[in-house]
Image (cartoon, helix red, strand yellow):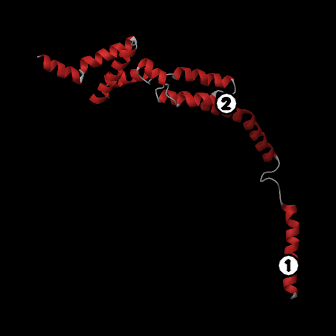
Amino acid sequence: MDTGSRFRRSLAALALGLAPGLASASFMQGETLDSFAMGLAWFIVIALPIGGVIVFWKLHILPEKIAEKRHHPQKDAIQVLCLLSLVFGGLLWPIAWLWAYTRPTGTYMAYGTEKHEDYFHEMNEKWRAGKLSHEEAEELRDELEGIASRARLPRKLKALLKDLEAAAPAPGAAARAGGAA
């Protein structure tokens, strides 16, 4: 080995030996580091708990929102279970989640529908705005007649059924009227 390469290796080893002394644990120093640490501490103490509560709340009302979107006939009970789940630390939340995705068979047998009453009110608004096709209006009328045959309709749904029957007579009614003439 020549003297030049040995010198370069020694110099490189010396530089590597001194490098840890030049390293610092943070890219900030002094007052900047203190200010950053104080800001981070306030963020952790104030913003994270608030964000955690908001995420916890949004997560716990998910079953309620799912039941509302799917027009679950027991969405009000699911809402109460979601609120109770908040009180009991989330223990009831899986039950509310499963309940939101199931359809109770007893509701259909008792009332003739698997939908919450709000669904019919929404469809009523769409029908009055002219946003329902003739087929959808017929389907809505048939569903309301099915409910009326099994259970007593609330006043608003009775009025909707009468309006639907007056606007678009049933296909069988047109055939009966033609046969009677």
Disc sitting over residue 134 in the figure = none
Q: Position of residue 135 (x, y in %)?
A: 28, 29
The picture quadrant where one finds residue 138 is: top left
Residue at image location 52% in from the left, 23% down from the top:
75
Amino acid type, residue under disc 1 in the picture? Arg
Amino acid type, residue under disc 2 in the picture? Val
Q: Is residue 96 visible?
A: yes
- The crowd level at tag 1 (other Cα within 10 Å; few <14, some 14-19, many 20+) is few
Residue at image location 87% in from the left, 73% down from the top:
13
| Residue sticking out furthest to the left | 181
Count of all numbered marks drawn on residues in the image: 2
Of the 4 image quadrants, the one containing the C terminus is top left
- The crowd level at tag 2 (other Cα within 10 Å; few <14, some 14-19, many 20+) is few
The picture quadrant where one finds residue 86 is: top right
Of the 4 image quadrants, the one containing the N terminus is bottom right
Residue at image location 81% in from the left, 51% down from the top:
29
**SS label for mark 2:** helix
Q: Position of residue 175 (x, y in %)?
A: 18, 22
Q: Is residue 133 visible?
A: no
Q: Nearer the viewer, residue 23 or 170?
A: 170
Disc 1 and disc 2: Cα gap in Å?
A: 59 Å
N-terminal-most mark, 1 or 2: 1
Residue at image location 86% in from the left, 62% down from the top:
20
Q: Position of residue 148 (x, y in %)?
A: 36, 15
Whether 38 is drawn above or below 92: the answer is below
Q: Nearer the viewer, mark 1 or mark 2?
A: 2
Q: Which residue is mark 1?
A: 9
| Marks 1 & 2, CB-CB < 8 Å contact | no
Q: Which residue is mark 2?
A: 53
148 with respect to 80 (left or right): left
